Image (spheres, helix red, strand yellow):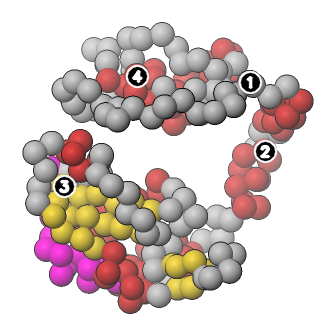
Amino acid sequence: MLGPIELPSAEVARSRLHDFAALGPAARLGLEPRSDRSHWTHRADRVVDAVTVQDEPRSPLDLLNGPPAGAPFRLTLAGRYLRTEHDHGLGEVALAVMTHLVVTGAVDPADPDLRRAISRRGQGLPGAVWRTFGRDPRRMREVLRQARDPEPVADEPGPYPADPVTGPAAAHLARIDADGVADIRRWRERSGTGASLLCARPASTSTTRSPPRSTCAATAARAHVP
């Protein structure tokens, strides 16, 4: 979710999304699963149907806690707030960020650099395997360790709270430079925690204790040190 900012009209948002999806399947928008559920069909013209409009919520949490889209991709314009939802089969955080940039006009789909960026090779599974294990073969040892000695998990998931967010909401900004990220990575390796850098970075700004093994402690970012 993005906001509060000045957003374009629904017509402009649909036009920008269509132009982005028209770059091809590499844009990841306009992809729909076929009936066999093992292949995708690219329909850039269908992206315009994924844009919905609603009133601005009293709290952005109301928008976040809304019902799921039930579609591979959905973009909601709610006053000064923008919410995107997509299946992980389409992409990860990078897709959401790029969608925000395109819709807000920060990135022009006609920019040739954008086409080159989304079409570069090495983004598939072989590239991911190389980036994960080829650059640091020690990670394979950890994978084998977890396969031999998996951590215990509950047979059944616990009850999901009806209202998981309580109390006032607040957002804080903490900048961590490249040296700080390197220090966090070294700490993670020394401590033996299984948390990813995505979780360790916000946890490093917290006044609470370190995150437990293999647990994402992004919620610890609520309390920031000066």
Whether residue 180 is visible to the viewer of this picture, yes or no, is: no
Which-is-in-front pick, marks 4 and 2?
4
Evaluate if marks 4 and 2 touch, with contact meaning CB atoms under 8 Å apart. no
Q: Residue at x 39, y 17 (%)?
A: 206
The amino acid beneath tag 1 is Pro
Which residue is depicted at the point 33% across and 55% down?
67
Closer-to-camera residue (185/37): 37
Local packing at callout 2 (Cα closer than 10 Å; few below 14, some 14-19, many 20+) is few
Residue type at mark 2: give it.
Answer: Phe
Question: Please, what secondary structure does the residue beneath circle 2 have?
Answer: helix
Q: Earlier in the sequence, mark 4 or mark 3?
A: 3
Residue 9 at what x, y percent from top left?
13, 74
Mark 4 vs 1: CB contact within 8 A = no
Say what amino acid the circle numbered 3 marks. Tyr
Query: Closer to the observer: label 3 or label 2?
Result: 3
Judging by the rendered image, the residue that carries numbered circle 2 is 133
Please name the residue that numbered disc 4 is placed on.
220
Q: Which mark is residue 81?
A: 3
Q: For residue 34, which quarter of the picture? A: bottom right
- Residue depth check, mark 4 versus mark 1: number of the one nearer the observer: 1
Foreground: 7 or 59? 59
Query: Label 4 to label 1, Cα distance in Å?
Result: 24 Å
Q: Which residues are magenta?
A: 4-18
Q: At which x and y percent is residue 111?
A: 37, 79
Q: CA distance from mark 3 to mark 2?
A: 39 Å
Query: Is residue 9 part of the magenta span, yes or no?
Result: yes
Q: Which residue is located at x 31 percent, y 19 percent?
A: 224
Residue pointed to by mark 1: 152
Whole-angstrom CA distance, mark 3 to mark 1, is 40 Å
Q: Residues within 10 Å of mark 1 (few under 14, many from 20)?
A: few
